[in-house]
Amino acid sequence: MIDKEVKHDVFIERSIWFWDWVKSHGSAISWAIVLILFAGMLLTVLRNAREARRRLAWDRLATLSVPDPGEKPSGVLPGPSDARVEDWLRQFRGTDAEPWILLEQAARRLSNGRANDAENDYRRIAGRFPGHCAGAWARIGLGACLEASGKIEDARREYEAVRAAGTDPAATDRATEAIRRLNGPAGTGGRRS
């Protein structure tokens, strides 16, 4: 976790140093310089905090496939509980890791037999991140859900949309493979006689 007290102490220490310097140099030019330096320091602290939050979000994302301590093995994807993932989503909303955490959550739901929840999650992600790579992968997941529920033409439309958008080359390749599979031999829709 980010050590907020250390960052806070560094900020206070720098602020005290600036205040002491200002008291010893009382001219108007010094005040102007101090204000500029203080603004720069504040922007640096805020940028560092944002970067630390981003790094922490990616660290959390990396642990999604690591089982919680004490979790019993089962046929579902390993990883933290849904409650913990929800907490991470609240904590890291707005970071660049958010769409990927959402995708992992949807994949876990699909793997755990909650296909309707997964389908809704994939629809939400695709709608929220249409030009993002995660949006393309959400449409791939949505296509898989639709295909599993027998809605082949709807699945094909999702795969075609990924191919047409071309947002992510790997997702485009996966969509192309899925379309070929759905077309199957001699246009049988993927079914063999």
Image: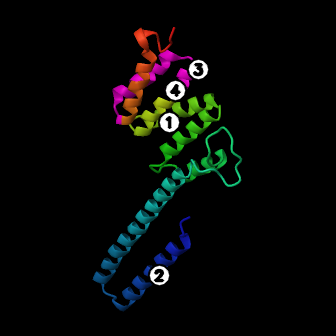
Residue at image location 51% in from the left, 58% down from the top = 56
Q: Quickly name the residue at label 3.
A: 149
Of the residues under marks 1 and 4, which one precedes in the sequence?
1
Sequence-first disc among 1 and 3: 1
User: Which of labels 2 and 4 is toward the front?
Assistant: 4
Give, as a three-letter code, the residue at label 2: Glu
Residue holding disc 2: 13
Residue located at (56% from left, 53% from top): 91
Tag 3: residue type?
A: Ser
Q: Give the range drawn in magenta.
A: 143-169
Say what secondary structure mark 1 lies in.
helix
Res 42 quadrant in image? bottom left
| Distance (Cα) linking label 2 and label 3 | 61 Å
Number of other residues with Cα within 10 Å of mark 1, as a class: few under 14, some 14 to 19, many 20 or more: many
Who comes first in sequence, dot 2 or dot 1? 2
Kind of residue indicated by mark 4: Ala
> Quick check: can you spot residue 92?
no
Q: How far apart are marks 4 and 3 (CA)?
A: 9 Å
Is label 2 in contact with label 4 (beta carbons under 8 Å)?
no
Q: Depth-wise, is mark 2 or mark 1 nearer the camera?
A: 1
Secondary structure at badge 2 equals: helix
Q: Position of residue 113 (x, y in %)?
A: 65, 31
